[in-house]
Image (cartoon, grey):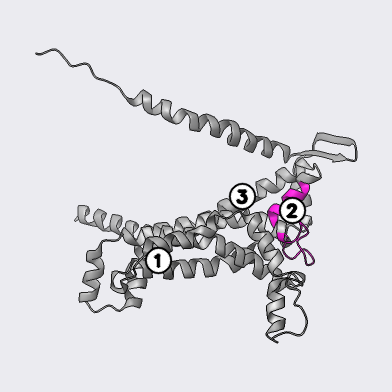
């Protein structure tokens, strides 16, 4: 009876289960990332049939990129992201609030969830080809506008800066607003109904409830949405690549940073591609840090104030 029971240690099974992930990450992500950083310090490209390098050149690739059109393509990427993200987050918040609000008594919410999420399942290449066909000078959109008498000549949507950028932003909005809506709905549903009932008893209207209760309480999900959207925006490639035939037309105003990176990879200039990848990594980290601080600044300030108050109480 007094014999000690043999203790069973299950921790080894946890390590065994997570081992495949770490092996896959190390082989397919970590090693290529380190290799990319290493290539960024070398001159390594192909000129015709002749392969140049790898020759160590230090920071020369980074300096060349700063003197190139990289900044311009970064501004293009930011503009295309803003055009798609602002309506995405606004409409996603509106839909999430409406679908979760029990007072509106919206029936068939599961059906609407499926419908708004469906565009997220369509491949970006299919979206781009569809919009390329619809908005071409001989496409159905121009045919409808001319038949209604709104225009006398076909509008060259893909030949204008505002037209191309608007189409890219609109496609990104369509593909991702459903996913954002589902996440925000889940966040709002996680708020206790008692809080909303108490706000109604206190006489809060819909706007006060949304801005004073809903938004502050779903801040972590908003931070996650913003961070993933920023990373996805910097990686924007497939839609403008297909829509503009990899040219970034007109006049490279829709050329993104990843399209610029792909042009270096296509020309076998691995040194410049590696340096540009490092720049993207650094910019992504900085932007995500600022987004996180902006969305969680109040929480940090509140925790610091509470800590100071606790210290004063202990001293007193």
Residue 179 in the image, given as x and y percentages of width and height:
48, 58
User: In the shown orientation, is residue 221 left or right of residue 229?
Assistant: left
Q: Is residue 54 left or right of residue 35?
A: right
Q: Which residues are magenta?
A: 243-264
* Badge nearest the viewer, 1 or 3: 1
Q: Is residue 261 magenta?
A: yes
| Mark 3 vs 2: CB contact within 8 A | no
Determine the residue located farthest toward the bottom in the rendered image. Answer: 149
Disc number for residue 96: 1
Q: Residue at x 54, y 54 (%)?
A: 121
In this view, the residue farthest toward the left is 1
Residue 235 point in image, percent of width and height: 63, 53
User: Which residue is tagged 3?
Assistant: 282
Considering only order in the chain, which callout, 2 or 1, is on the residue closer to the N terminus? 1
Q: Nearer the viewer, residue 81 or 290?
A: 81
**Alpha-carbon span between mark 1 and mark 3:** 33 Å
Which residue lies at the image location 68% right of the left edge and 74% below the top edge?
Answer: 141
Residue 46 highlighted magenta (yes or no) = no
């Amino acid at each position: 009876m007094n014999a000690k029971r043999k203790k069973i240690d299950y921790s080894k099974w946890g390590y065994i289960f997570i081992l495949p992930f770490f092996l896959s990450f190390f082989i397919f992500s970590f090693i290529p990332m380190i290799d990319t950083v290493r290539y960024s310090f070398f001159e390594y490209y192909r000129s015709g049939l002749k392969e140049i390098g790898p020759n160590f050149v230090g920071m020369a690739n980074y300096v060349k990129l700063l003197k190139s059109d990289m900044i311009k393509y970064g501004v293009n990427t930011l503009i295309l992201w803003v055009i798609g993200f602002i309506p995405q987050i606004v409409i996603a918040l509106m839909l999430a609030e409406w679908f979760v609000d029990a007072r509106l008594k919206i029936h068939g919410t599961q059906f609407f969830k499926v419908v708004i999420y469906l565009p997220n399942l369509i491949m970006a290449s299919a979206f781009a080809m569809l919009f390329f066909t619809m908005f071409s000078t001989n496409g159905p959109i121009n045919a409808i506008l001319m038949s209604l008498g709104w225009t006398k000549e076909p509008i060259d949507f893909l030949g204008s800066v505002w037209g191309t950028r608007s189409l890219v932003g609109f496609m990104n909005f369509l593909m991702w607003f459903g996913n954002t809506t589902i996440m925000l709905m889940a966040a709002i549903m996680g708020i206790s109904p008692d809080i909303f009932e108490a706000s109604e008893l206190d006489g809060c209207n819909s706007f006060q409830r949304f801005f004073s209760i809903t938004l502050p309480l779903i801040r972590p999900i908003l931070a996650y949405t913003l961070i993933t959207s920023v990373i996805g925006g910097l990686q924007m490639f497939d839609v403008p690549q297909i829509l503009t035939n990899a040219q970034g037309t007109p006049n490279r105003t829709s050329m993104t940073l990843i399209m610029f990176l792909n042009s270096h990879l296509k020309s076998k200039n691995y040194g410049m591609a590696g340096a540009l990848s490092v720049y993207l990594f650094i910019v992504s980290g900085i932007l995500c840090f600022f987004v996180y601080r902006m969305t969680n600044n109040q929480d940090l300030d509140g925790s610091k104030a509470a800590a100071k108050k606790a210290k004063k109480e202990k001293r007193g």
